[in-house]
Image (cartoon, coloured by chain):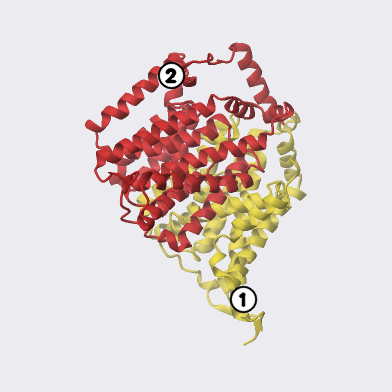
Chain colours: A yellow, B red
Amino acid sequence: MFTILGIPGPLLFGQLLLGLINGAFYAMLSLGLAVIFGMLNIINFAHGALFMMGAFVSWMLLEYVGIGYFPALILAPLIVGIFGLVLERTIVSRLYKLDHIYGLLLTFGLALVIEGLFRNGYGSSGMPYRIPAALQGATDLGFMFMPNYRGWVVLAAVVVCFLTWLIIEKTSLGATLRAATENAPMVQAFGVNVPRMISLTYAGGVALAAFAGVLAAPIYSVNPNMGSSFINTVFAVVVIGGMGSILGSILTGFGLGIVEGLTKVFYPQASATVVFLVMVIVLLARPRGLFGKAV
Amino acid sequence: MSISSRTQTDIDRAAGEAAPVVPKAGSMFGFSRTQAIAFAIMVLLVVLCPWVLYPVFLMKVLCFALFACAFNLLIGYVGLLSFGHAAFFGMGSYITAWTVKHWGLSAEVAIILGGLTGAALGLVLGWLAIRRQGLYFAMITLALAQMVYFFCLQAPFTGGEDGIQQVPRSSLFGLLPLDRDMAIYWLVAFVFLAGFLFIHRVVHSPFGQVLKAIRENEPRATSLGYRTDDYKLIAFTLSCTLAGIAGGTKALVFGIATLTDVHYSMSGEVVLMTLLGGLGTIFGPVVGALVVTAMENYLAQFGAWVTVTQGAIFILCVLFFRKGIVGTVGGWFRLEL
């Protein structure tokens, strides 16, 4: 067995991988928050609840309909995305003319309702979701054994984040989206249906959260609180990265996951708080966030 | 860009519609006549209710009412939405409970220590949080409070998941034992009324006028020469002090301080109380605290339905009822309550 800085290699890499997985979820969730914020000027407090819904929908699909993991990876985000679309059309869209804090308060209320309903229906203990057969087992990478499913989560998250970045930064649809973020009335004057675009953006951000939820289902137990335990950390991630840049959200998410993993190795007591400590340092040194635009 | 210009037109329009209400010099403690009557009614209710209603329930309401009033000082008068007020409430409650249990301090000293803890924590966290505005401020306070939560989860003195239990109610000035419900009730009532009047005085002082100016238009307040960050930090610290006092008082009443008090759902609850009662109204937070606490009492047997109801109230308030109970009722009679 080899050691690095007095730490056994497998332990170090094992925690790094765990950190990377957490980072993947931070990245996907903060990316969705950033996209929604850019377009709607709303901090979607319900993001954690919708992440949890993604996991639950995939569990329900398996339990009640017998639809397995891979179809659920497409179907669950679609279903939750449509739910998000309905939410946006019926409730969230009434807030655009109001002060931003009302958006935060309303989505906080939505999160309470969604989580409360699931807690009523399924209790707080959580249900297991089996890792799909194709992704079971582990691979020997030479320096460590990597459970296949965990590798898959990181890979899937990287691909999805990259695709989102590609769509927003490199396609004409993304260009219109960014333009509408800057100046909605102007884009509307060019004949773009901005309200529909806003709805679809919200649905897209929500679907991203649900996708993360499906990926998370086999790792954590599927329970109504899985979102709220994530979302507070994700808010810190968003403050650290600043919501100005898509790539920034992704990098900050993965980076902080790794920092958290390393802390677990070297100073486990601080692993729960390290992200918040990083936030404090960033606030002191660069209040607008690592990738934030000047205010 | 669009935000500031919209706020601007709002202010200009408001200025055109009605001249600002300036309390006459020497008026009753900054109260208008209606407010003074409402305050007298409230004092009367505080004094009479324990003979009709269960005193422990009333004390819970009064503690949360003070907590909500402290929170309202920020959201209602400075326009700062703190989503981490549970940190100050909870730490106040821990320190009061711990000092009473282990040092045998008398009640008033322990509550003051709880308040000072809230102040110290508020000074540090506020100093960090006011670096950003608006939604970021809310997220930062939430994240910092989450850090405090994890600290309380791990620190040995808080007792982790068990909390600090079986805290004696101690005595006032080391003389008057507070074990009977009606004995401690008067202490709680005094703390609440003193805190309430203090907040009211702050809001109606020249300092409070600057706070409102910051709420309406911070760049303008800056350009008039006010160091807005200093004002915000002082207001934040004051609010946290009172939150700590409220937490400490609650810990004494119930003889327990637990993680529930520092959990972020407690921060959400105080937001709910203030929103439901009426943001920026004097009596709103008190009414909100009463309604929310009563609702929790009656719904407690239905488990997670409490959460669902709270969430639904949040949604309904934001969509249809943004002035809250007191703001709406006051609006009917054109009164500023």
Give the residue type at disc 1. Leu
Crowdedness near tag 1: few (<14), some (14–19) or many (≥20) residues, C-alpha within 10 Å: some
Give the residue type at disc 2. Gln
Q: In the displayed structure, would residue A285 be above or below residue B191? A: below
Q: In the displayed structure, would residue A222 be above or below residue A119? A: below
Residue A12, disc: 1
Residue A135, disc: none
Q: In this view, does B125 lie to the left or right of A176?
A: left
| Label 2 residue SS | helix
**Which image quadrant for residue B34?**
top left
> Which quadrant of the rendered structure holds the C terminus of chain A?
top right
Labels 1 and 2 positioned on one and the same chain: no
| Label 1 residue SS | helix
Could you tell me which residue is drawn at 45 percent across and 55 percent down? A225
Q: In the displayed structure, would residue B102 be above or below residue B169? A: below
Look at mark 2 in the image and give the residue it sits on: B35
Q: In this view, does A172 lie to the left or right of B117?
A: right
Taking the view exactly as shown, the residue that stands out farthest to the bottom is A1
Q: Depth check: B54 or A55 in front?
A: B54
> Which quadrant of the rendered structure holds the N terminus of chain A?
bottom right
Q: Is residue A252 left or right of residue A99?
A: right
Which subunit holds the residue at mark 2? B
- On the image, the x and y values in percent for residue A36 come to 63, 43
The answer, for residue A279, to whether it is visible in the render is yes
- On the image, the x and y values in percent for residue A48 come to 52, 51
Q: Depth check: B284 or B4 in front?
A: B284
Could you tell me which residue is drawn at 67 percent across and 34 percent down? B228
Task: Give the number of callouts.
Answer: 2
